[in-house]
Image (tube, rainbow, N blue to C red):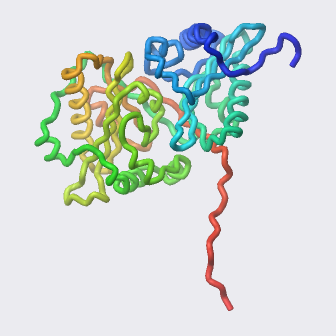
Amino acid sequence: MTKGSGKVRSARLTDLAALGELSRLAQNDQGESRSLGLPVSGPRIGVFSLFRLPLGAFRPHDLLFVYENDKRISGLLRVERDSYRDEWTIVELDAIGTGEAGDIRFRLLQHLLRDGQKRGAVRLHVACADALGNVELFMQAGFARYGDERLLFRPTDVPLPAPWTDGQARACGIRPSQPLDALGLARLYSTVTPAPVQRLESYRLADWERQGSSWRVPRSSLAPLLRFADVDAYVQEQPGGDPGQLGGFLQVGIAREDQPHYLKVMARPGADADSLVEFGLGAIAGRISKDGSCPDHGVIAPVRTYESPIDRRLEEAGFLDIATVTLLLKETLVRVAEPALVPAVR
């Protein structure tokens, strides 16, 4: 590189103050900045908002890259790594600078792709608004656009319903999820999810068995939000009690910090999604009233476009549409046909 040209490098502890300021500027300035922060915290979740959180918000295996030019940091890339599935999620991609922001983000992304190949990342995920050249940037880098997701928000001025009793939950077939539900959850997912999306996300039974704190199956654009939440999972049994044919699935994230609570609903066509939504909101209300350390910053729910009419059930429960994001994915491994034996003909 020539003298004075910028370079991409790993972030250092001494960079944190500058990174927080860059993140804040990039996500609030609509001029020459380019930001990929998720619209979930004042108004987005970025490095600058993490300064209000415990140091555990930064995990040792996460990645932070910066773009430095003439000893000035003008670009930031933050990635969260899933050690179970060797998947990386791009959470933030910021750049500032007159006429240079697009090039800075492209160089940061190319550096990440090279680093991911060296470290054995299987998939790279990103969710972004279709604005400021976001989608074009990732598709130019080889990402595949495979869906859109609506983000719905239930404000704090709408009262939460009362928590359900155990009898009410049993009457609707709702109970906590357990590892033995893995097969039923896999079948439910395959019923409501188009085949191309199933192929790209490539969940296994072991993934569905790991329901619990901070686990992110099924994936959504708000997966990074679960890092700051206590996550509980519930299933809804269909009439007849066949554990292999679940009617619905509910994921509830109770925010521990200055973030909204999280609700994810997955239901078969014709299933009683209304009861799942009401039960989930009641579970959040019960936790807030029981634990004074759980703030109430509203509830946010992601719904993919092919999951309709779940979005209508949420809107009936007081949720409002706040954003639509595009889901993109890049596989670093090449798919090959599985070898198999075929009958011989004499």
Q: Is residue 323 left or right of residue 4?
A: left
Question: Where residue 190 appears, x then y in whole percent?
Answer: 42, 54
Seen in the picture, residue 324 relative to 341 is either above or below; the reply is: above
Q: Is residue 228 visible?
A: yes
Question: Where residue 7 appears, x then y in whole percent?
Answer: 77, 18
From the image, which quarter does the N terminus lie in? top right
In the depicted view, which residue is nearer to us: 291 or 44? 291
From the image, which quarter does the C terminus lie in? bottom right
Seen in the picture, residue 241 relative to 18 is either above or below; the reply is: below
Q: Is residue 141 left or right of residue 204?
A: right
Seen in the picture, residue 150 relative to 99 is either above or below; the reply is: below
Q: Is residue 342 left or right of residue 114?
A: left
Residue reaching furthest to the left: 167
| Residue at the spot 46% in from the left edge and 22% down from the top edge | 56
| Residue at the spot 73% in from the left edge and 21% down from the top edge | 8
Seen in the picture, residue 230 relative to 85 is either above or below; the reply is: above
In the depicted view, which residue is nearer to us: 120 or 123? 120
Quadrant of the image occupied by residue 280: top left
| Residue at the spot 57% in from the left edge and 42% down from the top edge | 86
Question: Where residue 286 appears, x then y in whole percent?
Answer: 20, 27
